[in-house]
């Protein structure tokens, strides 16, 4: 694990270099992932073999975009399972 700066809170957190720009768990717990209207949006793996599932207001969607504290992000499947949230259009 290496240390990187979270794009939301700007604090240091440990993660794999592959996900160096991911949102930290503290921000995900504090702000949650939300749709453009502010509704909580949840992401999970479909099953043991992977795949990504997004739900909002009890409805499944194929839109993996979300907002974390007002920052536009995208949910992605991690290489060996799990979900990572990466900001879009942040350099």
Image (spheres, helix red, strand yellow):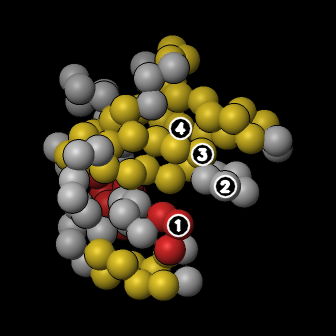
Mark 1 / mark 3, whichever is N-terminal:
1
Q: Secondary structure at mark 2?
A: loop
Mark 2 / mark 1, whichever is N-terminal:
1
How far apart are the two marked residues, 2 and 4, measured between alpha carbons? Answer: 15 Å
Q: Residue placed at 72% from the left, 57% from the top?
A: 80
Mark 2 / mark 4, whichever is N-terminal:
4
Q: Secondary structure at mark 1?
A: helix
Residue 38 is left or right of residue 17, and the answer is left
Is there CB contact under 8 Å for labels 3 and 4? no
Q: Residue placed at 82% from the left, 43% from the top?
A: 48
Is there CB contact under 8 Å for labels 3 and 2? yes
Q: Which residue is mark 4?
A: 43
Q: Which residue is mark 2?
A: 79
Q: Secondary structure at mark 4?
A: strand
Q: Secondary structure at mark 3?
A: strand
Residue 35 is left or right of residue 45, and the answer is left
């Amino acid at each position: 694990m290496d240390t990187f700066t979270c794009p939301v809170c700007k604090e240091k957190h440990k993660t794999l270099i592959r996900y160096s720009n991911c949102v930290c768990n503290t921000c995900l717990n504090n702000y949650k992932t939300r749709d453009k209207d502010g509704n909580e949006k949840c992401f999970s793996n479909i099953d043991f073999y992977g795949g990504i599932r997004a739900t909002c207001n009890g409805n499944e969607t194929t839109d993996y975009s979300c907002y974390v504290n007002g920052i536009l992000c995208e949910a992605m499947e991690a290489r060996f399972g799990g979900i990572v949230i990466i900001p879009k259009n942040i350099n």
